Image (tube, helix red, strand yellow):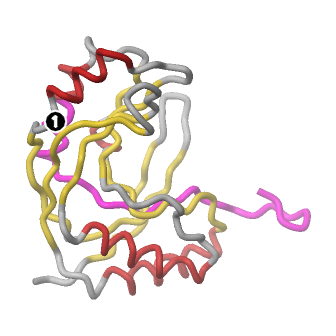
Amino acid sequence: MAKDGVAVAVARLFVAVKISPEVAERICRAQDRLAPLLKDIRWIRRESLHLTLKFLGHVEDSRIDDVETAAQVAVAPLPRFDVSCRGLGAFPDIRRPRVLWAGLEGGALPALADATEQALEPLGFPREKRDFRPHLTIGRWREGARGGDALGRVVDDWRGRDFGRFAVDEAVLFQSTLRRDGAVYTALKTFPLRAN
């Protein structure tokens, strides 16, 4: 990226919560079972499964320290908590799906996301206009794909499926590097939540 004719180093960043290896394993087993039923979908790899709290986009390297400080201040006062992963759904809807997700339930997730939003807004990262809906993206449809009856049946059949619980004890600043075979996420810094 160039600024006033000078090259500026930037990174594509987001703040997220990692999930436990046990829940990731259950999600991967579900993907294997769903693959024959759902066409034109690109499955998210185990190491890339996460809950996004705030997508920042391209951030100049010189601003990353400020982002880290703000995120740490936001997260530190919040107590650790548990989250349940249950059921499947699609965004924006079943007829025109772009994202297949597994639901996340935990009373403190909205508070964690809101604290992150509030802390980063003064640094020039606008608040998300859409309501926060906690989920794990587990697959993405290719452009123009249609869900139809097969997706409707899958969502109904898997509505109550329990993928397990996991502890949320930190948030993580990730760098996303886009590659032909999908994005690769690198953890840059962790922000511990308050011990109970």
The x and y percentages for residue 63 are 62, 76
Range of the magenta residues? Answer: 1-29
Residue 23 to residue 3: above or below:
above
Q: Residues within 10 Å of mark 1 (few under 14, many from 20)?
A: some
* Residue 159: % across, % down: 16, 35
Q: Residue at x 28, y 23 (%)?
A: 152
Three-letter amino acid code at the position of disc 1: Arg
- The residue under label 1 is 159
- Give the tally of numbered discs: 1
Residue 72 vs residue 134, the one in the foreground? 134
User: Which image quarter is the N terminus in?
Assistant: bottom right
Q: Residue at x 47, y 83 (%)?
A: 70
Q: Is residue 37 left or right of residue 82?
A: right
Kindly indicate the quadrant of the structure image that contains residue 45.
top left
For residue 90, which quarter of the picture?
Answer: top left
Residue 30 highlighted magenta (yes or no): no
